[in-house]
Image: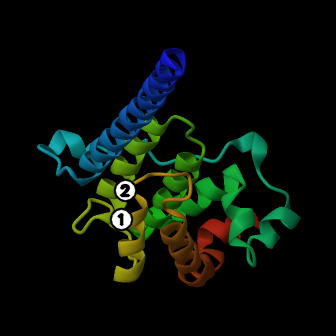
Amino acid sequence: MVEHNQSLKDGSSMELGKQAQINNHNAVWAKEIKIKLGILLQKPDSAVDLVIPYNEKPEKPAKSHKPSLDEALQWRHSLDKLLHNNYGRATFKSFLKSEFSEENLEFWVACEDYKKIKSPVKMAEKAKQIYEEFIQTEAPKEVNIDHFTKGITMKNLVDPSPRSFDLAQKRIHALMEKDSLPRFVRSEFYKELIK
């Protein structure tokens, strides 16, 4: 009987030990989420925090990768084909810069880069950077998204994942497709490509 009671006590101790491990794991997880949320919601303390990591020099398309006429003609009807061609994207960016509207493309590219991040810590840092640069009100390169999309994006950033910016990125993609692409294909930038 004493042995039986001892084994029950040992079993209870093991259960309590497991429960303590689970509680400890949950506390660590909750603390990580709190830290991530804190990082995202911090306001920059100085202008140094707003330094943009992108190359400020105009991009020049690589001469060796100039698209064929057929490829360039496909861009008239497919923003995706344009964006996934390095030469096309660089030419499109030059066009957008000439119109002072390159923030939409820069946001789209930042989202594509963000999706490739594997480290949760780096993902949280990049999410904060994208939020401060493109999403928050009065951001240096604030993109034009509706309040609903902004709200969903902010909720997604509580626990950043590769899909956190998907809705905002889709809205900006649609805007570029409807507005910027038609102007681009009428521009001298595009006409030079299809000569």
The residue at the far top in this view is: 3
Give the residue at x 61% y 66%.
189
Q: In this view, does 36 lie above or below 71?
A: above
Circle 2 residues within 10 Å: few <14, some 14–19, many ≥20: many
What mark, if any, has residue 154 been given in the picture? 1
Name the residue type under label 2.
Val
Q: In which quarter of the image is residue 194?
A: bottom right
Residue type at mark 1? Met
Q: Residue at x 37, y 73 (%)?
A: 150
Q: Which of 42 and 60 is in front in this view?
A: 42
Q: Residue 90 carries which label?
A: none
Specify few, some or many for label 1: CA neighbours under 10 Å numbering under 14, 14-19, or 20 or more: some
Q: Mark 2 points at which residue?
A: 158
Q: In this view, does 142 lie to the left or right of 121?
A: left
> Mark 1 or mark 2, which is nearer to you?
2
Q: What element carries label 2?
A: loop
> For the C terminus, which image quadrant?
bottom right
- Give the image quarter of residue 183: bottom right
